[in-house]
Amino acid sequence: MPDRAENDWSTQLADIRRQGLWRELLPLQPDPAADHPQFIDGDGRALISFASNDYLGLSRHPALQRAAIAEIESSGLGAGAAPLLGGERPVHQALAADLADWLGVEAVLLFGSGYLANLGIISALVGRHDRIYADRLNHASLVDGARLCGARLQRYRHGDMAHLQQLLARGGSGRAWIISDGVFSMDGDLAPLPELASLAREYHARIILDEAHALGVLGDQGRGTLAHYHLGNEDVAVIMGTLSKAFGVYGAFVAGSQDLIDLLRNRARSFIYHTALPAALAATARVSLQMLRAGKDRRARLHTHRLMLRAELPDAPWLPSETPIQGLVLGDATRAMQVSGQLREVGLYCPAVRPPTVPQGSARLRITLSAAHRRDDLQALVTALREIL
Ligand SMILES: Cc1ncc(COP(=O)(O)O)c(C=O)c1O
């Protein structure tokens, strides 16, 4: 028996290699002497990273580090238990209150990660007889949550509101849910939220919005896609946010009405059965939130970086995007790996993103910008891409 399993694994691995989809971990150590996203690889080489979702450059901010250390000294490291079984500390509640105040919602529930939050939200709220309408480019965790809940999943073409309307108009059993990323994680473009909200009203659907890449980056005080479009919270039923991207920390949360949060606390299995977020991360996220709210200059810097990149490489195969996620579509996986490798040779870390993360034939470089990048970092990237592309 074991032999057969092992043969099967080696066949699968050979397939992965043949398709150019082999993945390896590449440990990168932040360079302690650098105040921009410079990392050291296993061979001791310095690499400027364009791969991190630390958009505002907060992950290494001394104020965050001090907050983490102070909380570790008082609370220790692991929370030791599930939130409902003694893992919750006062600092978790303080963070939830801060987040609710920031987003202007009644309540917030913390989760261990965005992945867990999406699985928990969808499987707790959406019934087997309901209908889900999901953008084709939604994050994998939303797709997995939709599969887990057993509802009928209908995927509309990316950003295509006419297609969504067609599907909604067919109707069906149960309640209707529209699920979308606010900012799409691989393309960097925005969901057409005003149109989504109006279709939701017309067809009595509720919106679940994943704000992982929007919070901290878009809108007044970094409040995300809703703020960017000047929409009110009443336009969406559920907001999911992560603490792992612009916050520069780790963990996630769901924001909405008190009833929503009470229901998730009682029903979301990935909340009930996970160990609480370490208190130190909650304490750090509180400090991060203050900086993020006041982070106008950082957001302006990000904007300038993006404009510079696009202006310097006007003919590159960019995907349309108003956010720090800038995709350069290169087609097949092998070509994307090749370009990524050439960039690495000149000290720039820009990983290739390949299927199944992105659709077949759209392998790409996913370039993410940070307010912590220096102008020289961008110039180095521009010069290298001019030579390679
Ligand atoms: C759109 C989106 N949703 C959810 C997640 C999952 O969040 P986390 O990394 O906190 O698990 C990610 C992160 O990769 C994401 O890009």
Image (cartoon, helix red, strand yellow):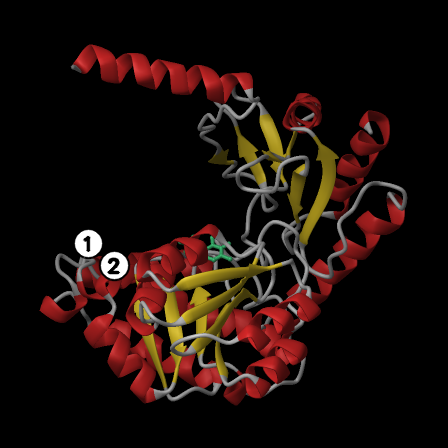
Ligand 1 has an atom within 8 Å of the beta carbon of the residue at disc 1: no
Looking at the image, is mark 1 or mark 2 earlier in the sequence?
1
Q: Which residue is mark 2?
A: 278
Q: Indicate the secondary structure of the residue bearing disc 2.
A: loop
The local crowd at label 1, few if under 14, some if 14 to 19, many if 20 or more residues have their Cα within 10 Å, is: some
In the rendered view, would you say 86 is above or below 34?
Answer: below
Q: Indicate the secondary structure of the residue bearing disc 1.
A: loop
* Residue 260 visible (yes or no): yes
**Which residue is depicted at the point 48% across and 32% down?**
28
Looking at the picture, how far across and down is residue 83, in whole percent? 18, 67
Q: Quadrant of residue 287?
A: bottom left
Residue 115 placement, left or right of 60: left
* Residue 251 visible (yes or no): no
Which kind of residue does numbered mark 1 sit on?
Gly
**Which residue is depicted at the point 26% across and 73% down?**
91
Instruction: Tell me the quadrant of the picture where the C terminus can be found.
Output: top right
In the rendered view, would you say 69 is above or below 387?
Answer: below
Residue 131 placement, left or right of 39: left
Circle number at residue 78: 1
The alpha-carbon separation of the residues under discs 1 and 2 comes to: 5 Å
Q: Quadrant of residue 196?
A: bottom right
Instruction: Tell me the quadrant of the picture where the N terminus can be found.
Output: top left
